[in-house]
Amino acid sequence: MFRVGRTSRDIARPEILLIRRAPGRILPGLWQCVSGSLEPGERVAVGALRELAEETGFAGADIEGFYDLDLVNQFHEPSVDGIVTAAVFAVRLRTDAEPRLSHEHDDANWHEVDEAHQQVIWPGYRAAIERIRDDLSDPARAPWFELDLDGGRKPR
């Protein structure tokens, strides 16, 4: 999740929202992006937006853009003794958007891009932040990654 505010000199200033995993969950205290699992029969992009709404309350009018980052992470997850595959998406939010966290997370903070990149632990999160910085913050590049809220490619 990101938003693009403006400085007093009208320079774009992207910010990344990180959320902290609550105590009593796997990896408590970890600062992360929204993550989750698909429900049976659910389309991948639709599942990403559902998880966004469940974990942060962001939906509908909060969302200015929805993007496929062309990034798929795979990692070993000991709790399921398996390899997890995760498609990665990004959502551009209104500049005044603030999260309403679920019980799964106990804190949320907006960070400048470099701060967020340093804050996250997992390489996949750093790669997603880099794509937001390098591709989605560029108005000429971002439209190539944009989806509609049903998960289809937006016409160019």
Image: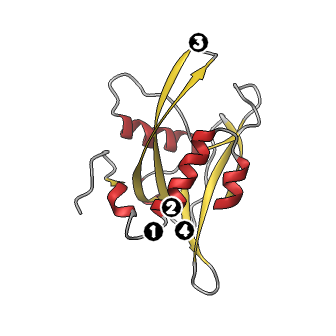
Circle 3: residue type: Asp
Spatial separation of the CA atoms under disc 4 and disc 2: 14 Å
The correct choice, above or below, for 127 with respect to 76 in the image is: below
Q: Secondary structure at mark 3?
A: loop
Q: Which residue is mark 4?
A: 4
Residue sitting nearer the eye, 143 or 48: 143
State which tag comes first along the sequence, 4 or 3. Answer: 4
- What residue sits 67% from the left and 58% below the top? 110
Spatial separation of the CA atoms under disc 4 and disc 3: 39 Å
Instruction: Say whether residue 71 is left or right of residue 114.
Output: left
The correct choice, above or below, for 37 with respect to 141 in the image is: above
Q: Which residue is mark 3?
A: 81
Spatial separation of the CA atoms under disc 1 and disc 3: 39 Å
Instruction: Say whether residue 134 is left or right of residue 118.
Output: left
- Closer to the eye: label 2 or 3: 2
- What residue sits 48% from the left and 32% below the top? 86
Q: Is residue 18 visible?
A: yes
Q: Position of residue 66 (x, y in %)?
A: 40, 54
Residue sitting nearer the eye, 47 or 10: 10
Circle 2: residue type: Asp
